Amino acid sequence: MAQINAVHKNARISAQKVRLVANMVRGMYADEALDLLKFQPQRGARMLEKVIKSAVGNAQDPDQNGGTSHRIEELVLTDVRIDSGPMFKRIRPRARGMAFMIKKRFSHIRVGLTPIDEL
């Protein structure tokens, strides 16, 4: 089974926020997922939309697929993974000389497309 992948590493958004929109599109056709994400208000939807467009572009490039090109209508989102990435750690001063940790989280967004005839 030939899976076409695209990755956005170190996306400046927490993985929890992107997973909400990733769960909506998992298992959908690529063109339907892009139409759905276009009208979602979340910032993570924009990032996921870009990664899906990149995976579709990889699928349509015959140089990357062993000489075959796939149409967007026949691609299914089979692998949508949102992993947590590194964190910026900052210190927030609090009362009586204490300090609280602020974690600015990153995430890795992975999308895998599979042609419908190979499922």
Image (cartoon, rainbow, N blue to C red):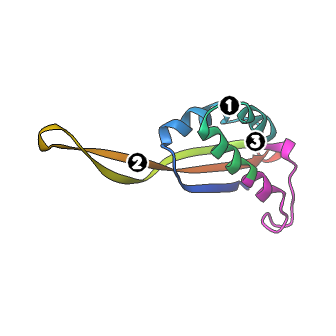
Instruction: Name which of mark 3 and mark 1 comes first in the sequence.
Output: 1
Residue 60 locus on image (x, y percent): 84, 57
- Gap between marks 3 and 1 measured at Cα: 20 Å
- What amino acid type is highlighted by mark number 3? Val
- What residue appears at the point 68 percent right and 31 percent down from the top-left corner? 40
Q: Report the side of 55 relative to 62 (left or right).
A: left
Contact flag, marks 1 and 2 (Cβ < 8 Å): no
Tell me, yes or no, if residue 1 can be seen here.
no
Q: Which mark is residue 40?
A: 1
Front residue (pair 30, 104):
104
Residue 80 locus on image (x, y percent): 62, 44
- Gap between marks 1 and 2 measured at Cα: 24 Å
- What amino acid type is highlighted by mark number 2? Lys
Residue 10 locus on image (x, y percent): 52, 56
Q: Residue 59 carries which label?
A: none
The quadrant where residue 28 appears: top right
Span colored in magenta:
54-76
- What amino acid type is highlighted by mark number 1? Gln
Q: Report the side of 69 relative to 27 (left or right).
A: right
- Magenta stretch: includes residue 62: yes
Q: In this view, does 42 lie above or below 59?
A: above
Instruction: Check disc 3 and report its element: helix, strand or loop.
Output: strand
> Nearer the viewer's eye, disc 3 or disc 1?
1
Residue that carries the numbered disc 3 in the rendered image = 76
Tell me, yes or no, if residue 17 can be seen here.
yes
Q: Residue 104 carries which label?
A: 2
